[in-house]
Amino acid sequence: MDIRIFTRVFRNPFILSLITFISIMGPGIITANVDNDAGGITTYALAGSNFGYDLLWLFIPMIITLAIIQEMGVRMSVVSGKGLADLIREKVGIKLTFLMAMALLAANMGTILAEFSGISVSSAIFGVPNFIALPIAALAIWLLVVKGTYKSVEKVFLAASLVYLSYIVAGILSQPDWGLAIHNTFVPQISFNDEYITMMIGIVGTTISPWMMFYLQSTVVEKGISIKNLKYSKADAVIGAIVVNIVAFFIVIACATTIHANGIQINDVADISTALVPLAGQYASLLFAFGFLNASLFAASILPLSTAYYVCESLGFEAGVSKRFREAPVFHGLYLGLIILAVMIIMIPDIPLLSILYLSQVANGILLPFLLILMLFIINDKKIMGEHVNSRLFNIISWATVIIVMSLSIALVVTSLI
Amino acid sequence: MYLSEILKKPVFDGAGKKIGRLKDAIVSSEVSYPIIKAIIVDKDDKKTVNIPYNYIDLIGNETKLKTNLDEIREYKIQNLDIRLLEDVLDRQVVDIEDKKVRRVNDIKISRSHGYYHIIGVDIGFYGILKRLGLEKIAKPLHVKSNENIIAWEDIDTLNQDYSKLKLKVAKQSIKKLHPADIAEIVDQLGINESINILNSLDDEAAADTLEEVSPERQAYLLEGMDVRRAVKILDEMDPDDAADVLGALPEETTEELLGLLEPKESEDIRTLLEYPENTAGGIMTTEYAYIEQDLTVGEVMKQLRDIAKDVETIYYVYVSRDGKLTGVLSLRDILLAEPDMKISEVMISPVITIDIMEEEEEVARKIAKYNLLALPVVEDENKLKGIVTVDDAIDIVLPVAWKKRVPRMFR
């Protein structure tokens, strides 16, 4: 067929602006999908199973909050052309950077553990014992990163992103009570018992996490998006925030309609999968487990490497997968160390997985307020942002957002310590 | 002595009265090992003052001035000045020697004959430990104090936008590098710094550098640049590379840039844009040498000099009749043939060609199989459209640096 027909179609102005948008788009959407990781899905599923539709109202304020924070992150990176780790180092010098890097290392280690425990749990559902599943997963992750070329990796990632749609399908197939769901989305159902509040904090904490902000900003930098396309990037950040919450919304709905409605007591993802078999059929259960495995693998393939990159780059160590171990010992040590350590810890028999997930949330909860404050200082620095500093109104909104998120994460830390 | 040891340390005037703390030091960017020209002092009343070096007695743990503050004529910061804290410390610099981007952990200063020379930057772990106040643990960790210092001469700072300066900039070592090396550095940097570097190069060097950067990034860099500058660089690029970049840009921008290019150049690029990226048409260049079949060797020899000016390779000269490819001559064939011979007698025919819609891997395979330096690309059997040179074919088989790089999606 004559290819020129295609080129002519692609020159249609509407299609062109769409293509421009799609080419700019990506960081926000991918980050959004990575954000629905093992910890995220567990939390949303538990929220739906234990509280039904009661927590659905949380998603609208969360979309707004996440959109505000992501927009600031994207704007910062597009204008400065730098990632968050770089900006922090250049803004506050080495001491604070070092503290941040160590805190991030600890928090991310916790999250990596959560991802590998997710792999362990979901492969157990498929009957694969974890002493086989974990090493294979670790090897697959390592191979994908070290041996994969840019294009194949991108395809794998996009395919992985599509799997998240299965949750939306699952949500719709579960035949929810739409009237009640919509009502509860717009009318908050607040109760003041401990469990409810802990769950609320947990949802916010897992949706807005420190590593996600680092990750979003470096993908923006990697794409090399110029200031002229800032508006597309902003849209991407906002759409990403909406997408992540829609997927989460449907996970809550699916679990609320099936598990909560039947009054089944749930503690973890394995319980959910078992409970789904009689309620929604074996395929729904397997689909859920597969989605969970995919989410854990997806995040597990990104987190160890990105952590190694942030730490090395902000402290000035040589970094890069293509470099030999001798050239970049700290980088490779961190990267491999994080994966191997995570696999080993998860393989310890009778390891208290729930406590690990909790600890990782606490570490993230401690880090988040500091990070948000630093972000606000950076985004209001005229030397870095020029005319793109926050407007006064936006500053009020974002400080308010930061204070709310901060108090929630402080509350999270306090409740987990008690 | 290191910069971190003198920053924020007290400054005393000639009478021994404390006037404030050392905030920053200024050096010139124009010499290899510059001296500290002035210091910036944060006065106790929260204002800052720039003190020229001739009023400074000693810089160190305590900085002493020769006179009182009111006798000092303040130093005016100039365009090419570098502020060590503001522009260098904790920032990225380009290591010209290793062609890498490094982060500065500290700056080494040495005193001789009353002047303070900047020796180099510390990029190692020791520099970090020292600034964290942990140098005591350096020894047990086997971290040596001076192994990771890069000479000041071998670095380029990135903060300056050279395009805004009309002056000739002396210290700009990056310009001396090969474009492929500059491209590797550009790939490690953010978009703003990359544009600064490209702006400091002349059009041809910038074009050569850009050709080695990944097409997606090329597009973003061109888009971020001043339009007139972007056009000049595009003009210098090979049409096939230029078409690749423009293909990655939004239509509006492409049209704007094409409109500003010279008509012939933009016509060539427009033709190339019609073909998909990974086909023979997508990677070919339209700048090839061709002659009419009814000439003699002598006549061709006379024309060669003219033809050579704007073709990608002169080693193969293609022969055509009524727009159809009939044969090919190598430069050697032309040089060795008798001047009065007809081209049709010496040319090699039939020519090995490839169809314009064929996949790029096939192009590379054919070039390798027949040991060619270039392969003519044809449409409808024998209408010559362009050529693919062997260097572009190698790029298909052995991807250049940016293709091997791990995507930052993981970061």
Image (cartoon, rainbow, N blue to C red):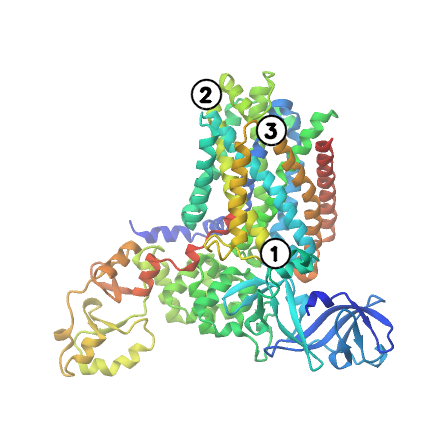
Residue A189, can we see it?
A: no
Which chain is home to disc 1?
A: A
At mark 1, the secondary structure is helix
Which one is nearer the viewer's eye here, B326 or B119?
Answer: B119
3D distance between C-alphas at marks 2 and 1: 50 Å
Mark 1, residue position:
A315
Tag 2 and tag 1 share a subunit: yes
**Other residues around mark 2 within 10 Å, as few (<14) / some (14–19) / many (≥20):** some
**Other residues around mark 1 within 10 Å, as few (<14) / some (14–19) / many (≥20):** many
Q: Position of residue A172 (x, y in %)?
A: 52, 26
Q: Position of residue A205 (x, y in %)?
A: 65, 37
What residue is at 57 percent from the left and 79 percent from the top?
B170
Labels 2 and 3: the sequence-earlier one: 2
**Amino acid of disc 3:** Pro
**Amino acid of disc 1:** Leu
Q: Position of residue A33 (x, y in %)?
A: 53, 39
Mark 2, residue position:
A282
Labels 2 and 1: the sequence-earlier one: 2
Which one is nearer the viewer's eye here, A92 or A12?
Answer: A92
Tag 1 and tag 3 share a subunit: yes
Labels 1 and 3: the sequence-earlier one: 1
At mark 2, the secondary structure is helix
3D distance between C-alphas at marks 1 and 3: 33 Å
- On the picture, is A369 further left or further right than A142? right
Mark 1 and mark 2 in contact (Cβ < 8 Å)? no
Point out the residue furthest to the front here. Answer: B140
Mark 3, residue position:
A352
**Other residues around mark 3 within 10 Å, as few (<14) / some (14–19) / many (≥20):** few
Which one is nearer the viewer's eye here, A129 or B320?
Answer: A129
